[in-house]
Amino acid sequence: MLDKNRQSRDDRTGSTSPRSGRRTDPTAGRRSEKKIVPGSCVEENLKSLTKTRTAGDADDDQIVFTDLTPTRLEQELIAMETPASDDIIRQWMDNQGLRLRKIRKVIPGGETPDRDAQFQNIARLIGQYESAGNPYVSVDTKAKEFLGRLFRKGRVRSSKAFEAFDHDFPSWADGVVIPHGIFDPVRNRGHINIGLSHDTTEFACDSLKWYWNRIGRQSYPDADSILLLVDCGGSNSANKYIFKHDLQAVANSIGMKIRVAHYPSYCSKYNPIERRFFPHVSRACTGMLFDTLQTAVDLMRNASTSTGLKTTVNVIRRLYETGRTATDAMKQYIRSTINYDTLLPKWNYVAIPQT
């Protein structure tokens, strides 16, 4: 029995057995490589396989891609008698720059002649407001979500997968969630007002008024003006009289000058809220069901970062009317109250509170 145990230990360590005189190989019959050695037969075979199945982008010589997966390459290498595991192949592909990537939405959909001038103007306004101790906030509406047992993208660690309807029919939802975000870059604080009906200019302006009365005023007690950085379209469209009318009503209500600077058309991704706040809100909610309104609120409130981002959330339960348009009387009132800048007035103006 002792000799058999010794023999088993000798076999595992790869030493010479005193009984058989034969040296055993502990790696025999299985893949042992930790990585693919440069210049090895395995790498040469991989290069030959990917060479004929790798394509390039005609418009960018820095982009190459392949439709071969590590699992498919593993099968090909086995057939070529140079086996390697798919994990090792995946590491080799990563080292070659053939990593999993998703399409990036960064190409502008059009050109705006005054794009650079407006970016310079926004930078100048931000500098002015920071120097004066006045707040500037980045504002936008996040994509609408449905309440109920409807599928949402992403994965989450759990003992069992959440179950959702097999179809994403809006009629099966229990309601909608419309997150209107307001991000303060100086304080690194984000706020979301959740609407339950429609993304209208009135909702966006009510969201701003709620934020200022309950958060902004306490954070900037000595401020005499607030700068809004907003997109060119949507509920805060630059060419909608109704937005300026509702914004003027907010200025009258809070007794504060509201300066607006629109990002040029096709440049909404440059709005700070798009890259410094909304991605963290999405991460906090990924893979989770919005089965109830409270669940959505709690998840969004968890959006934070190691650099200090914190999030507050409120629900605005008012129902908003769609299809509102500015009357002639509204337009006349706006012309007498809104002060347009001489530089790019279509994107830059101030709502001054009226007594």
Image (cartoon, rainbow, N blue to C red):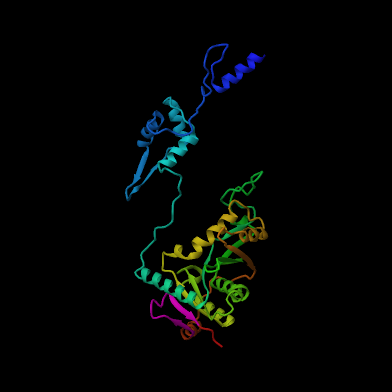
Observer-nearest residue: 223 or 70?
223
Q: Residue furthest bottom?
A: 355
Up-down: is 110 above or below 20?
below
Measuring from the top left, give residue 73's x and y in whole percent.
Answer: 44, 33
Quadrant of the drawing holding the N terminus: top right
Q: Nearer the viewer, residue 14 or 130?
A: 14
Q: Position of residue 88 (x, y in %)?
A: 48, 35
Residue drawn at the location 59% of the way across and 78% of the way down: 221
Query: In this rendering, is residue 166 above or below 188?
Result: above
- Magenta region: which residues? 337-351
Residue 147 shows up from this direction: yes
Q: Is residue 56 magenta?
A: no
Q: Is residue 13 above or below residue 1?
A: below
243 and 132: which is toward the camera: 132
Left or right position of 198 against 237: right
Q: Looking at the rendering, in which quadrant would you find the C terminus?
A: bottom right
Q: How many discs appear? A: 0
**Residue 119 appears in which quarter of the rendering?**
bottom left
Seen as rendered, the residue at the extreme front is 18
Residue 240 in view (yes/no): no
Residue 294: where, in percent of width, then height? 67, 60
Can you give x and y, in whole percent of width and height, for residue 130 in the image?
A: 49, 74
